[in-house]
């Protein structure tokens, strides 16, 4: 009888001292070039697909879609991160095997061009080693007989231990006597319920990401809240500041806008004629930010990885923050325009470098630019994209009545 993975329903684990084992995964650490790859979770990509194909049901879904959008636009490549489990099949009388399992993603076809342009790949992040049973196994009967066998074996070993005058073992990893405990009714319950409600599982998933040096984009609020408490290498001085000012702007319009829309989703929707055109607009926005994102991550890499003078690093981050703070106010003033120039991470210092006049870049930025801030192309492009944006009725042009009703119901 051939065993199909779909036949595996209930999930179990070895108990006892096996629960003390630290199961997890490792991730390489980088100290440069965050531009190259952004790590984004499966949930965020799923919700961006839902924005295109249908299925949005909450504000959290919109913000998850925004998260995936940022990963695509602000990195050359994206790697999708999924928590995964190794499942060892107990299948008496048949060949046993182990396989990896992870959440089932939505059909990615509506977003395929954007994923292809970002050289999309998937990384499985192991968080546990579990057990499953083949369909021909009567699990209740199997566990009952196993418990009886374990009890007999432990009794025999105890008698032998006492006779030999040996001490009780303090730690023992023996699959033949370890209890088997239920975990979940199936993989869907595990990844949608058990994983997302377990601090231990979430920490196993997030801890390697936190120390990796990569920018990480998490769509699910449960994991995102945990991650914000950890050290991370996201572009907080840019995105967090934009989000704060955008939220204030949306709050002012709360009597006009039924549903607040995340910032970059607003830009994409304002440029799209229908849901079918959203994917193409994402590609256009990614291309529009091609130079700007390079400059943005160069600045963050300098401040976080390469500048050993903390005063200079702090100044670079403060300049990014200052530029981000000005985006929303300037965008709301239609008569004001910024004209982006091409700068490297030293701002105007690059012009002196090309003339052969700059001998020590580090000393120059420390002494010659105390009252100047770096002009950030990413801030310029974002601001210009927002200048002609009309939010009233924007989301209603794209979502169905059922989706809008679900969002409204979930906000109450």
Image (cartoon, rainbow, N blue to C red):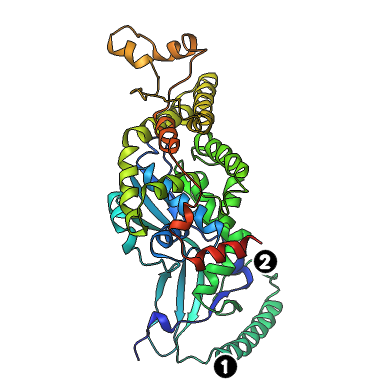
**Location of residue 244 in the rendering, given as x and y in whole percent from the top left corner:** 58, 39
Quarter location, residue 357: top left
Quarter location, residue 264: top left
**Location of residue 205 in the rendering, given as x and y in whole percent from the top left corner:** 52, 56
Which is more toward the observer, 160 or 92? 92
**Image position of 353 with respect to 343: above or below:** above
Left or right of 194? Residue 286 is left
Report whether residue 375 is seen. Answer: yes
Left or right of 13? Residue 111 is left
Left or right of 247? Residue 123 is left
**Location of residue 336 in the rendering, given as x and y in whole percent from the top left corner:** 45, 25
* Residue under label 1: 141
Residue 43: which numbered mark, if any? none
* Residue under label 2: 170
Which is more toward the observer, 99 or 9? 9
Report whether residue 26 is seen. Answer: no
**Image position of 337 with respect to 258: above or below:** above
**Image position of 194 with respect to 288: above or below:** below
Q: Give the residue furthest to the top.
A: 357
**Image position of 145 with respect to 403: above or below:** below
Q: Is mark 2 on a helix, strand or loop?
A: loop
- Quick one: label 1, few (<14), some, or many (20+) residues within 10 Å? few
């Amino acid at each position: 009888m051939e065993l199909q993975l779909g036949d595996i329903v209930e999930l179990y684990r070895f108990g006892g001292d096996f629960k003390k084992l630290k199961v997890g995964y490792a991730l390489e650490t980088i100290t440069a070039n965050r531009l190259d790859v952004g790590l984004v979770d499966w949930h965020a990509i799923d919700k961006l697909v839902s924005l295109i194909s249908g299925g949005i049901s909450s504000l959290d879904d919109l913000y998850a879609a925004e998260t995936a959008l940022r990963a695509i636009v602000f990195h050359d490549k994206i790697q999708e991160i999924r928590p995964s489990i190794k499942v060892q099949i107990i299948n008496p009388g048949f060949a046993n095997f182990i396989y990896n399992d992870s959440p089932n993603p939505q059909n990615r076809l509506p977003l395929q061009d954007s994923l292809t342009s970002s050289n999309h790949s998937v990384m499985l992040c192991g968080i546990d080693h579990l057990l499953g049973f083949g369909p021909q196994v009567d699990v209740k009967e199997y566990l009952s007989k196993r418990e009886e066998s374990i009890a007999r074996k432990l009794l025999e070993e105890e008698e032998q231990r006492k006779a030999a005058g040996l001490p009780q073992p303090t730690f023992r990893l023996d699959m033949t006597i370890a209890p088997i405990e239920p975990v979940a009714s199936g993989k869907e319950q595990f990844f949608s319920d058990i994983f997302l409600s377990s601090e231990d599982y979430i920490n196993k998933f997030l801890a390697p990401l936190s120390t990796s040096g990569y920018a990480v984009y998490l769509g699910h609020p449960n994991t995102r809240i945990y991650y914000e408490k950890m050290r991370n290498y996201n572009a907080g001085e840019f995105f967090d500041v934009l989000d704060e000012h955008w939220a204030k702007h949306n709050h002012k319009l709360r009597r006009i806008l039924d549903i607040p829309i995340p910032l970059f989703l607003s830009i994409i929707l304002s440029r799209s004629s229908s849901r079918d055109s959203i994917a193409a607009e994402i590609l256009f926005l990614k291309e529009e930010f091609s130079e700007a994102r390079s400059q943005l991550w160069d600045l963050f890499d300098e401040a976080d990885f390469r500048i050993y003078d903390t005063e200079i690093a702090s100044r670079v981050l403060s300049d990014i923050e200052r530029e981000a703070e000005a985006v929303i106010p300037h965008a709301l003033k239609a008569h004001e325009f910024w004209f982006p120039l091409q700068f490297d991470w030293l701002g105007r210092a690059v012009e002196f470098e090309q003339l052969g006049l700059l001998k020590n870049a580090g000393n120059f930025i420390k002494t010659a630019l105390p009252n100047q801030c770096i002009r950030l192309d990413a801030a310029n492009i974002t601001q210009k994209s927002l200048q002609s944006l009309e939010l009233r009725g924007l989301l209603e042009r794209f979502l169905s009545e059922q989706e809008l009703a679900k969002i409204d119901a979930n906000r109450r």
